């Protein structure tokens, strides 16, 4: 799923390699989702292993690297704008390399649209970044490394698939996707799903624990598909069980991108049994009308969703649920959209992301075209978000009077900012706390106020408790 398209410029936190003071510098801009962020950190480590060190400004860099996003139209536009801006200001001797999802799908087109581009590196061969830079220096024409291999190569280079940001870290457990979603180009970009070996994941989690990481976020295009290609049934549940045992000092283990229909009883039981696996699940549903879900080639058993969410809330009473929806899919009627509104009102998710349908050439939905007017899409998105804002505020108000563990991520002007277990990094809300707390620490906070997306509170005396900090009445 698309994430925040926020550039990550200069040194990447947690690259984990001490760079020598050499003349070779790289400037990296990472766009798109958390999965792209992990790939960017991995490329940075490969460059640093080869003697490069990062530059916070493009003017001082020898290599300009943009890890692009190509998931939907606005992301493609942002990636192209970033490349053009860097190309326009490029000085003699600098190299400009485009990597990532946009490059994988539209490499030749990007080369035509961005004069001055020196190299193209696709998603399935990002581990060749050093070799591509060396080749680009030897030629006057753009160098292409756009593998048409079935999927991305995994774990052949000894580089961790992690990205540390503050005291949180993303840990990639698989890459690629085998789901048939009609609107999605990810299988065309990444290839089919390939799971990483469990020992490599556990070793990387242990290294994150040794670095003092407080939160590990498991990511993949579909985390619930983990282990399928390895012949493992309920692979995510097995992995979580082992992770909780291997990294007991990491208070929060979070799961993103669960696929409807694959949240099993065993997965729910494992989440409930381990205090360090936070009671949070991101399960993108995309819609609630069976006909549209079938058209999207998504699981269309809405009753399964109701039963599973009811079961999860019974077993995990403090569960925070996040989902995403697409509005304006080809053929969506007002009545079908109203059914989505009714579903959201009844289900009362804690977090909801809403996207307007983006026409993607080459996907299974291409024959349907893009018949819903953009104004109708935006109006439906606004209505759904308005409804969810009311629900989110009510859910947040229910937290008043409770105490939550908060991971502190910033402070200033007498306030501290952090997140509770109910908030995934970058995409969810925050907790605003009175006072200056230590950044990177876990603090117990008494919730005293609620906004549509955020909470406010005051710190409580340290109690020595660990884990996600289940809500407590004070």
Image (tube, grey):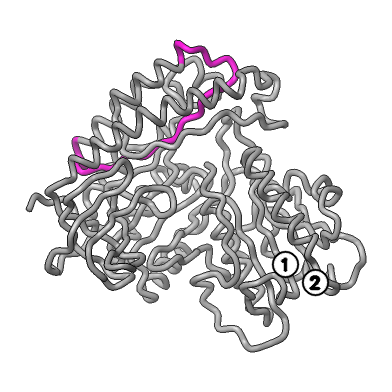
Above or below: residue 472 compared with residue 350: below
The residue furthest bottom is 21
- Residue 425, image x, y percentages: 40, 54
- Residue 172, image x, y percentages: 50, 56
The residue furthest left is 474
- Residue 208, image x, y percentages: 41, 70
Label 1: element kind:
strand
Q: Residue at (41%, 32%) from the top-left corner? A: 260
Q: Residue at (44%, 37%) from the top-left corner? A: 353
Mark 1 near mark 2, Cβ–Cβ under 8 Å? Answer: yes
Above or below: residue 296 compared with residue 159: above
Quadrant of the rendered image containing residue 275: bottom left
Residue placed under numbered mark 2 in the picture: 94
Label 2: element kind:
loop
Q: N-terminal of the two: label 1 or label 2?
A: 1
Q: Residues within 10 Å of mark 2 (few under 14, many from 20)?
A: some
Q: Residues within 10 Å of mark 1 (few under 14, many from 20)?
A: many
Q: Which residues are magenta?
A: 314-336
- Residue 330, image x, y percentages: 60, 19
Residue 127 is a magenta residue:
no
The residue furthest right is 140
Residue 333 is a magenta residue:
yes
Choose between 352 and 387: the one closer to the eye: 387
Residue placed under numbered mark 1 in the picture: 64
Q: Residue at (86%, 55%) from the top-left corner? A: 115
On the rendered structure, is 419 left or right of 372?
Answer: left
Choose between 26 and 411: the one closer to the eye: 411
Above or below: residue 329 compared with residue 181: above
């Amino acid at each position: 799923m698309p994430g925040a398209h926020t550039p990550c410029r200069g040194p990447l936190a947690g690259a984990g390699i001490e760079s020598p003071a050499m003349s070779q510098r790289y400037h990296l801009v990472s766009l798109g989702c958390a999965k792209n962020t992990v790939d960017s950190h991995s490329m940075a480590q490969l460059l640093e292993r080869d003697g490069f060190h990062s530059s916070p400004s493009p003017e001082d860099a020898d290599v300009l690297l943009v890890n692009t996003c190509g998931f939907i139209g606005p992301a493609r536009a942002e990636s192209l704008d970033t490349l053009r801006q860097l190309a326009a200001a490029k000085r003699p001797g600098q190299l400009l390399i485009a990597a990532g999802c946009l490059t994988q799908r539209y490499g030749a087109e990007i080369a035509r649209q961005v004069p001055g581009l020196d190299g193209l590196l696709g998603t399935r061969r990002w581990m060749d970044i050093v070799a591509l830079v060396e080749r680009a220096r030897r030629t006057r024409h753009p160098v292409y490394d756009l593998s048409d291999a079935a999927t991305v190569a995994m774990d052949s280079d000894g580089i961790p698939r992690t990205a540390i940001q503050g005291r949180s870290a993303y840990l990639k457990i698989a890459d690629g996707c085998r789901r048939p979603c009609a609107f999605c180009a990810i299988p065309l970009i990444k290839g089919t799903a390939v799971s990483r070996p469990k020992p490599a994941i556990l070793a990387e989690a242990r290294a994150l624990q040794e670095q003092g990481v407080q939160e590990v976020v498991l990511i993949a295009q579909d985390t619930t598909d983990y282990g399928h290609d390895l012949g493992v049934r309920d692979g995510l549940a097995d992995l979580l069980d082992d992770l909780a045992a291997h990294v007991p000092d990491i208070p929060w283990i979070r799961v993103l991108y669960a696929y409807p229909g694959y949240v099993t009883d065993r997965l729910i039981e494992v989440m409930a049994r381990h205090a360090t696996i936070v009671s949070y699940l991101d399960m993108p549903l995309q819609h609630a009308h069976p006909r549209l879900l079938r058209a999207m080639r998504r699981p269309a058993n809405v009753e399964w969703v109701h039963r599973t969410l009811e079961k999860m809330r019974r077993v995990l009473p403090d569960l925070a649920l996040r989902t995403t929806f697409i509005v304006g899919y080809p053929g969506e009627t007002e009545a079908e959209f109203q059914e989505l509104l009714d579903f959201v009102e009844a289900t009362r998710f804690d977090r909801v992301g809403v996207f307007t349908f983006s026409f993607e050439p080459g996907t299974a939905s291409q024959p349907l075209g893009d018949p819903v007017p953009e104004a109708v899409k935006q109006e439906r998105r606004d209505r759904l978000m308005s409804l969810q804002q009311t629900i989110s505020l009510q859910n947040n108000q229910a937290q008043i009077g409770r105490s939550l563990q908060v991971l502190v991520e910033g402070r200033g002007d007498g306030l501290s900012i952090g997140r509770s277990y109910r908030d995934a990094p970058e995409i969810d809300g925050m907790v605003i706390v009175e006072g200056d707390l230590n950044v990177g620490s876990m603090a117990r906070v008494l919730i005293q106020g609620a906004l549509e997306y955020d909470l406010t509170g005051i710190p409580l005396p340290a109690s020595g408790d660990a884990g996600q900090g289940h809500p407590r009445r004070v």
